[in-house]
Image (cartoon, grey):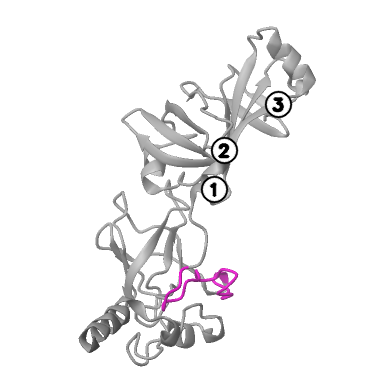
């Protein structure tokens, strides 16, 4: 059930024509954008909610059975809000959103919260964009739990892994660009594959904050898992962190001597995979079944 201040409820009951929707967006990198459907800017809790021409809300579908509330926001592309390059570059992916309604003529009446969640699928045309809003209940539809497996289930730097990734982050500039997927920093002298499976982050230009996984690294040359959605140039700055391929030799599961935990991060104590003795695998299970059938 949504709560609404008494003064605001009484005003809306009159059929008020001064109702305004407001959106609070917080990107993964921490950048905050605030917009409103009202015809002028609104100052709410110290933030200026800008009046954006062409930004339109869609009806919020909500039920009492705990299902996910869904809504959409559509609007015109603009350099000071949402651009095509940002959408294609993933800057707005999984952006946190809060939507609420106010009386634009009297903000002291408070606000009525409508929905909070994250941006889902985004798309854009030549002049406009469309963004899906997924409510907080979306998280309840996700499978939660650990996977029993020989490879490490932790993410590099999380609470199980405990490696200080930020201490290993490198900031530098590119010296050559071969394609949207391959570029070089001649100052890099790390061992081959040191940044393999790591994250490459753009630090300048309209794509600031965009990240892409590193597929391979050798002799200062980065190859990304996917090509960038734009033609890169020699950027003023980028940053990259090493990756972990989650391998640790255990009873022949991985080639002898291969261990990211031990050799790259000195972190075997926090390896989150299972020993072969406790992880038979499909091949072993099928093999045992064949042996039983032959004996019988």
Task: Give coordinates of residue 65: x percent, y percent.
Answer: 56, 35
Q: Is residue 135 visible?
A: yes
Do callouts 1 and 2 mark residues in contact (Cβ within 8 Å)?
yes
Q: Is residue 135 above or below residue 290?
A: above
- The N terminus - image quarter: top right
The circle on residue 66 is: 2
Q: Is residue 131 magenta?
A: no
Q: Quarter of the image holding residue 247? A: bottom left
Can you identify the residue that label 3 sits on? 111
Residue 104 x/y as whole percent: 67, 18
Q: Residues within 10 Å of mark 2 (few under 14, many from 20)?
A: few
Mark 1 vs 2, N-terminal side: 2
State the separation of the CA atoms marked 1 and 3: 26 Å
Of residues 156 and 167, the one drawn nearer to the viewer in this rendering: 156
How far is mark 1 from mark 2, CA to CA? 9 Å
Image coordinates for residue 5, horizontal then vertical, percent: 76, 24
Mark 1 = which residue? Answer: 140
Which image quadrant is residue 245 in?
bottom left
């Amino acid at each position: 059930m949504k709560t609404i201040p008494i003064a605001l409820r009484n005003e809306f009951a009159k059929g008020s024509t001064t109702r305004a929707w407001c959106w609070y967006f917080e990107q993964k990198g921490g950048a905050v954008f605030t917009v409103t459907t009202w015809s002028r800017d609104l100052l709410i809790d110290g933030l200026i909610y800008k009046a954006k021409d062409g930004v339109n809300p869609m009806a919020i579908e909500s039920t009492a059975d705990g299902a996910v509330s869904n809504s959409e926001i559509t609007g015109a592309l603009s350099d000071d809000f949402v651009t095509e390059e940002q959408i294609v570059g993933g800057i707005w992916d999984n952006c946190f959103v809060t939507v609420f309604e106010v009386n634009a003529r009297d903000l002291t009446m408070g606000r009525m919260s409508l929905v909070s969640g994250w941006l889902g699928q985004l798309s854009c045309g030549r002049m406009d964009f469309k963004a899906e809003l997924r409510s907080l209940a979306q998280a309840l539809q996700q499978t939660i739990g650990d996977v029993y497996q020989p490879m490490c289930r932790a993410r590099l730097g999380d609470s199980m892994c405990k490696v200080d990734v930020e201490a290993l982050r490198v900031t530098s500039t590119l010296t050559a660009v071969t394609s949207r997927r391959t570029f070089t920093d001649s100052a890099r002298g790390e061992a081959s594959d040191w940044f393999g499976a790591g994250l490459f982050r753009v630090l300048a230009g309209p794509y600031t904050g965009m990240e892409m996984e590193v597929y391979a690294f050798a002799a200062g040359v980065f190859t990304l898992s996917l090509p960038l959605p734009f033609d890169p140039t020699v950027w003023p700055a980028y940053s990259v962190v090493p990756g972990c391929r989650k391998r640790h030799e255990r009873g022949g599961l991985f080639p002898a001597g291969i261990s990211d935990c031990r050799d790259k991060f000195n972190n075997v104590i926090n390896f989150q995979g299972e020993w072969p003795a406790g992880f038979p695998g499909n091949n072993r299970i099928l093999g045992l079944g064949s042996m039983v059938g032959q004996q019988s």
